[in-house]
Amino acid sequence: MKSFGIDHLQEIEISQLWCSTLRGDRESFQKLMEATYDLMFQFGHKFSRDRELIKDSIQDVFLEILEKRTRLSSDIPPKPYLLASLRRRLHRLEQRQRWMVPGDTETTGFEIEFSSEHYLILSEEAGNIARQMTSLMNELPERQKEVVYLRFFQNLDRDEIADLMRIRPQSVSNLLQAAFKWLRTQWKPVISLLLTSFLC
Amino acid sequence: MVFEKQNQDMNEYGHFGAEDFVWNEAFRRWVLVPTQEDHVFWESWQSENPHKAAVIAQARELVQAIGPRLEHLPESEKNRSIGEIMEHFDDRALSEVSSHTPLLRSFWFRAACLLLLLAGFATLFTRYNMRKQTGFEQLLAAGEMLKEVSNDAQKTIRITLQDGSSVTLDPGSRLSYPEHFTGSKRLVQLSGGAFFDIVKEPGRPFYVYAGKVVTKVLGTSFHVRSFNNEKEVSVSVKTGRVAVFTRENDLSDDMDEISEQSGVVIEPNQQLIVAQKTTRITKTLVPNPEIVAAPEKVPSFNFEDSPVSEILKTLHTAYGIEIIFDENIMKNCPVTATLTDLSLYEKLDLICNAVGASYEVIDGRIIVDGKGCQAR
């Protein structure tokens, strides 16, 4: 089954690879990259459309791990660490670009589009609901979207998200709550609309 | 709200619509990365809330379907990038050859890594411990002394456990059980066949280990048959509900696949057959289903011009077995019959014959198929 994030078995495997990578094991380093590259690329793409920039940033993140490996703790959960490093690096590069090319603000914030199109066996009814839900999700403000994405599609916990986005844990909860409050209020009219269309 | 531990009371889900389930963490986990407990919980929830089946099916589909749009990244592009990083790694490794780390630090580092690894395995094992082939003794709580009873006689013997539960042990069978249950679980081990009548103790489930099959119950009566020289293990339920798991010999198998298959819940008159070798599970009905409705609630089996749909519903109430049929087709078939002293299968044969229908037992349920009788 295709899932959007990484399941906990993979996560345990990644933790083990992380550990042996910090010990300087070549093969583990390569496997760690193979296991996390897609995840990082997808995440990076939410901040920038520039594929080369994303790939360069991922390279920097991994090379930095090599450089700092004797100082990095094996207790650090690797996935949040990798995503946070990538996010920081992309922001830094973005700021540098902005400074060098004033007015060029192509790489801004967090952009994500939720969809259900890649999943083909949807029944017509579920398909309709999925479209309604994703279009509502896509209307969420940027930061709420990012929190929803990290929580539900990357399975990060509140503190990990706070760390990654550099906000207080309470703010993470607030953003999530705001997102769901809005989704709920918007969803009600959609439901009654669907219901009436069934009854007629 | 979203971060609160979602230990929702089973009843709370009753008001959930598909879109509520989609954002429920426990539900998502069951759909995307289920653990054994998730299967048990949701299967039993579903059988208690059969009217929610459509909502659950839809929510499952939605959870699988909705996600962030993925940017296409060709495998070749990814491998090229990783290759470049590896070149850097090799360059660095060459320049580092001369510098070596002190032995002590590397020792402690290794120790720390080993610990982390063990911790990883520990989580793995606790999540999947039901499937692990552990020595039964290791599962017992500290201080629980094992007692063993073998029945070498020709007839069954009855054993009363410390919690008041009773076990009727078949000839040629053996039961190991602690004299006092002190842990949070009540564990016994069975080789052979036995009928269990278990006293309900909220929060302290009862487990029967029999070969590769583990049966978990809260309070109920059921029969387990697991003889070493037989190819199959069977579990059948008389009252209440039990969950049955299988254990594997080693953990190297694909665990996701196993967890999808194991953890099956069965209800009265249902029976599970587990193949010893492959641990393949088949859900079916006991050979001779008994009436499970309370004596004062047993319906009358005398029907006069009753629609078949009504008769089938009566059988469902009496035997507690789900009977699936097309309401629209069966409601127009009036039948007059007296079925009182017949077995369930005889009753079904009679009714099906009367209206030109047939039935099958599939997955512990009865499916009645027919064309109806409007034309008559």
Image: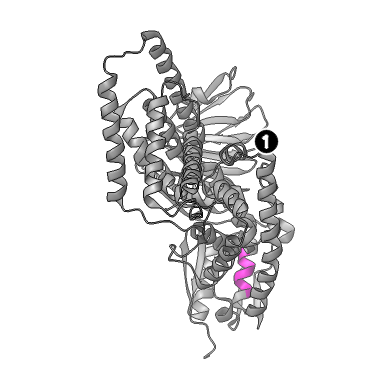
Q: Residue at x 67, y 65 (%)?
A: A187
Q: Position of residue A195 (x, y in %)?
A: 66, 74
Quarter of the image where one finds residue A172? top right
Q: Chain of mark 1?
A: B
Residue under label 1: B203
* Residue closer to the observer: B329 or A50: A50
Horizontally, residue B84 falls left or right of residue A40, namely left
From what the image shows, is residue B369 above or below residue B88? Answer: below
From what the image shows, is residue B249 above or below residue B99? Answer: below
Horizontally, residue B228 falls left or right of residue B267, namely left
Which amino acid is tagged 1? Answer: Gly
Q: Position of residue B353 (x, y in %)?
A: 49, 77
* Residue closer to the observer: B107 or B329: B107
Quarter of the image where one finds residue A173? top right
Q: Position of residue B88 (x, y in %)?
A: 29, 32
Examine the structure image and report whether residue B315 is included in the region drawn in magenta. yes
- Segment colored magenta: B310-316
**How is the structure coloured here?**
one colour
From what the image shows, is residue A132 above or below residue A75? Answer: below
From what the image shows, is residue A175 above or below residue B110? Answer: below
